[in-house]
Image: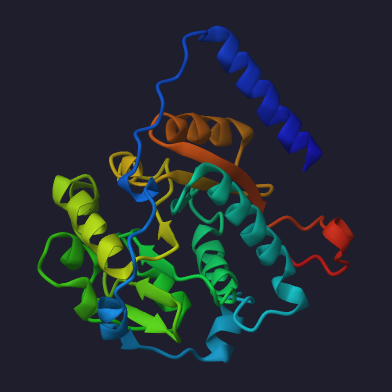
């Protein structure tokens, strides 16, 4: 992990030395403004859902009930909240340089970890529209897609679902044929603002496609306050991490880079069972 971080820092220094011009600041998000007083009408209208613990466990969602196995994700949650509070960030994208880095698993685990903070209202939107990975991971089936919501065919109150009183999801029932056009449209930005205003979440997590796989995320990232980049240990190359970080930084703020799927964490952070 230390070697990875050192290599990333070296790549950053070399890149910055070759390009002394300051980077343009990321576009300010309307979501950075203090949320208005809550009206629970739209939140209460969302359909209630339940989860099968066996399905969650099989799909490596370990934060549903908390406990020792949730420790690493809880630590990530706390660091995420600290950075978010420090900078006034609420809309947080989760992406990766390439596929199979565990970003959807991380999004699901962060969702339940955040929701165990009962004073927080959390909204999770699956905008990896080429598949229905988050819904499948959670054992949920829905009729529509987030594209139906973003293009105005279905209201989010009719599509979204919530667990207990402070966690809501926008999932996909099928793959979408034109995800890049949907995510990059002006209408999408408007609908997200409408959802934000209606539900008044404290944190919104967006599960986005990998940066190198498609152009879906490029036009969308300007709609978020920051992005968390997931890299797969022994899989995602340093060059890909550097390129992804540079691309994200051109569009929004980089919250951080998380090394996922590491097998060498015994004893880290006080844990002895290697939960990553």
Q: Residue at x 79, y 35 (%)?
A: 3
Give residue 77's quadrant in the image.
bottom right
Coloring applied to the structure: rainbow
Q: Residue 240, position in %: x, y? A: 54, 35
Visible residue check, residue 266: no
Q: Compared with residue 111, is residue 51 higher up or lower down, i.e. above or below?
A: below
Q: Quadrant of residue 177?
A: bottom left
**Point 58% across, 30% down: residue:** 239
**Whole-percent x, y for residue 70 in the image:** 70, 72
Q: Which quarter of the rendering shows the C terminus? A: bottom right
The single residue placed furthest to the front in the displayed view is 37
Q: Is residue 179 above or below residue 87?
A: below
Q: Residue drawn at (49%, 63%), measured in percent from left and top?
A: 104
Q: Is residue 82 left or right of residue 103?
A: right
Q: Is residue 129 left or right of residue 119?
A: left
Can residue 52 be spotted in the picture?
A: yes
Looking at the image, residue 63 sits to the left or right of residue 274; the answer is: left
Q: Quadrant of residue 275?
A: bottom right
Q: Is residue 77 above or below residue 27?
A: below
Q: Residue furthest left?
A: 153
Q: Is residue 143 left or right of residue 108?
A: left
Residue 175 screen position, x and y as percent:
26, 66
Between 143 and 86, the one lying in front of the other is 86
Q: Is residue 119 above or below residue 96?
A: below
């Amino acid at each position: 992990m230390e070697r990875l971080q050192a290599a990333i820092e070296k790549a950053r220094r070399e890149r910055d030395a070759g390009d002394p011009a300051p980077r343009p600041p990321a576009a300010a998000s309307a979501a950075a403004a203090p949320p208005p007083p809550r009206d629970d009408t739209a939140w209460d209208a969302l359909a209630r859902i339940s989860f099968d613990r066996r399905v969650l466990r099989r799909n490596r969602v370990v934060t549903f009930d908390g406990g020792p196995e949730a420790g690493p994700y809880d630590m990530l949650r706390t660091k995420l909240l600290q950075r978010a509070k420090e900078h006034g960030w609420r809309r947080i994208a989760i992406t990766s340089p390439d596929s199979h880095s565990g970003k959807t698993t991380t999004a699901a685990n962060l969702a339940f970890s955040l929701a165990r903070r009962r004073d927080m209202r959390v909204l999770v939107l699956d905008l990896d529209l080429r598949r229905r990975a988050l819904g499948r991971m959670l054992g949920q089936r829905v009729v529509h897609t987030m594209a139906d919501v973003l293009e105005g065919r279905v209201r989010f109150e009719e599509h979204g679902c919530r667990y207990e009183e402070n966690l809501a999801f926008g999932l996909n029932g099928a793959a979408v044929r034109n995800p890049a056009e949907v995510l990059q449209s002006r209408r999408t930005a408007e609908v997200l603002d409408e959802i934000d205003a209606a539900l008044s979440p404290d944190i919104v997590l967006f599960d986005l496609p990998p940066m190198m796989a498609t152009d879906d995320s490029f036009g969308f990232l300007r709609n978020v306050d920051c992005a968390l980049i997931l890299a797969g240990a022994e899989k995602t190359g340093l060059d890909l991490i550097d390129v992804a970080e540079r691309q994200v930084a051109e569009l929004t703020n980089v919250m951080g880079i998380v090394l996922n799927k590491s097998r060498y964490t015994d004893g880290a952070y006080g844990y002895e069972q290697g939960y990553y």
